[in-house]
Image (cartoon, helix red, strand yellow):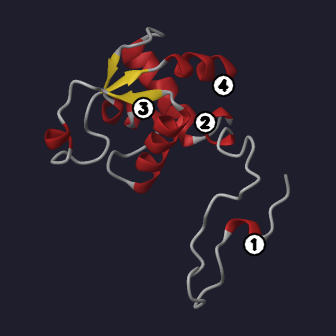
Amino acid sequence: MRLTPGDCYDGGVGQRGGGGYPILPRHNRGWERLMVTYPGSDAARLLRSINAQQAHGHVGSMVFPFAAARTAGLEPGTERYEEALWALVWEGALAVDEHVPPEVAAMVPFGRLPYRLAPRAVRLLERT
């Protein structure tokens, strides 16, 4: 898939309504799947680290991504860490632990709460 600037940006810098902010292209079949499945990506390394240290392939395991981040070469709280974690949540590899009340979750920095390893994570690990 070849992207042009018009595919990825909603208008140019200084234009009303767009401001040059990136958006996903409308013809993105498979686009988001590239994030985690690329073996060298931060998300893939974070998922492998979480699995090796905490989940050991057990779907439904409670995991703490921030505890495995440094092994994956990421620093918790940084933009790279947060992007990798968002990619795993977006892909369905990690699910927010349903036992954490929303009012508690709102007070904790992003990425510090427990997550659950989802079935999709095992399939992604098999591909990377």
In the rendered structure, which disc, 1 or 3, sits on the residue that comes first in sequence? 1
- Residue that label 2 marks: 36
Element carrying mark 2: helix
Q: CA distance from mark 4 to mark 2?
A: 8 Å
Q: Position of residue 56 (x, y in %)?
A: 44, 10
Q: Which residue is mark 3?
A: 71
Q: Position of residue 68 (x, y in %)?
A: 37, 30
Tell me, yes or no, whether the two marked residues, 4 and 1, touch with CB atoms within 8 Å. Answer: no
Above or below, 59 relative to 42: above
Given residues 99 and 126, the one toward you in this image is 99
Q: Which residue is mark 1?
A: 5
Whether the residues at callouts 4 and 2 have beta carbons within 8 Å, the answer is yes
Q: Residue furthest bottom?
A: 14
Asked which secondary structure carries label 4, the reply is loop
What is the secondary structure assignment of the residue under circle 1?
A: helix
Disc 4 designates what residue?
A: 128
- Mark 4–mark 3 Cα distance, whole angstroms, equals 17 Å
Q: Are marks 2 and 3 in contact (CB under 8 Å)?
A: no
